[in-house]
Amino acid sequence: MNLKEKYTKQIKDEAKRLGFMSCGISKAGFLEEEAPRLEKWLKNNMNGKMQYMENHFDKRLDPRLLVDDSKSVISLLLNYYPEEQQNDDTYKISKYAYGQDYHHVIKGKLRKLQEFISEEIGEVSGRAFVDSAPVLDKAWAAKSGLGWIGKHSNLLTQKVGSFYFIAELILDLDLEYDHAVTDHCGSCTACIDACPTQAIVEPCVVNGSKCISYFTIELKDELPLEVKGKFDDWAFGCDVCQDVCPWNRFSKPHNEPLFNPHPDLLSLTKKDWEEITEDVFRKVFQKSAVKRTKYAGLNRNIGFLK
Ligand code: SF4
Ligand code: SF4
């Protein structure tokens, strides 16, 4: 085994030990296939009011502009599929937001992985990313063989579906690189057919400005009347396109205690949600990503669903 192979194995083994579901590696470079797609998506205003998506166009497509001397993009998946879920007859929040905010949980693990690399391999510089900087995480994970991009535009795997977070370490270290896997969506269109707001406008293209996640989390203005009645009881995010995906039958519950919901969350009825006080909101969502909407934002969403 040469040094490159040895380092690659050490990193992948440690990632697994830290609880990541899988780890794949690609050579840092320009994302040629993504460039025209991203340009078209932005040109058609599919980012809605998410203006930040228009920033750093070049950096989004090439991590070498983001991290000096970067050589490798290490993509990591962390499962968040919960063992227990909200019942159908209540207002719903995306499963990824049940427990503690993933940014903190994943950053802690990435820090440990970086420490391991410094101790075992030596001085390696780089940066860790969790949904927080212009990195096209799904494209990198797909390039690294961790899955394919499903028609709902999420990363998808035959073994475990799509309920996981994606994070990256971009390093100035040469490693062994993985290869993309084949697409297994076939003739299925379940996600496109089930989307309550018809936001999946063509296979693998989600019009962000029509997606319930955008309306309930990103949009700070009043919710537009033309989508009233279409949110299918989703109060924060939306999992419909993933819930209907046949590959998600293979999702397995995570084993990260920090992702477990507050004990009161799963039993909240519609009435409880409608009457939620700021104190209860703070208690149930103390460390959750739901805090992004703040109390007023969640109330706006619930009011819209009534
Ligand atoms: S998250 Fe919901 S609204 Fe957005 S594309 Fe998927 S099904 Fe449609
Ligand atoms: S629901 Fe069907 S088309 Fe959509 S991502 Fe899953 S397999 Fe692909």
Image: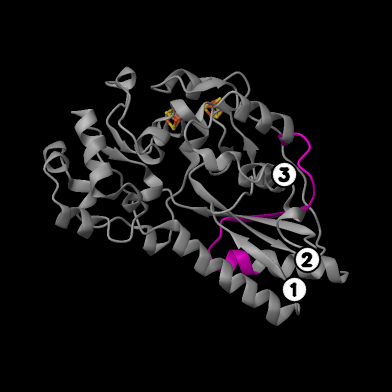
Beta carbon at label 2 within 8 Å of ligand 2: no
* The magenta segment: 14-34
Q: Is residue 176 above or below residue 295?
A: below
Q: Nearer the viewer, residue 193 or 286?
A: 286
Callout 3: 10 Å neighbours few (<14), some, many (20+)? some
**How far apart are labels 3 and 2 at the CA level?**
19 Å
| C-beta proximity under 8 Å, tags 2 and 1 | yes
Residue 130 belongs to the span the image colors magenta: no
Residue 266, given in percent of the width and then of the height, sits at 23, 47
Q: Kindly identify which numbered label has been placed on residue 223.
A: none
Q: Residue at x 88, y 69 (%)?
A: 2
Q: Which residue is mark 3?
A: 58
Q: Is residue 97 above or below residue 72?
A: above
First reached walking from the N terminus: tag 3 or tag 1: 3
Quadrant of res 128: bottom right
Q: Which residue is mark 1?
A: 124
Is residue 161 at least partly visible in the picture?
no
Q: Is residue 195 above or below residue 95?
A: above
Q: Is residue 175 left or right of residue 52?
A: right
First reached walking from the N terminus: tag 2 or tag 1: 1
First reached walking from the N terminus: tag 3 or tag 2: 3
Quadrant location, the C terminus: top left
Is residue 12 at least partly visible in the picture?
yes
Q: Residue at x 35, y 50 (%)?
A: 292
Q: Is residue 260 above or below residue 300?
A: below
Q: Which residue is mark 2?
A: 172
Residue 39, given in percent of the width and then of the height, sits at 68, 30
Give amino acid for label 1.
Answer: Val
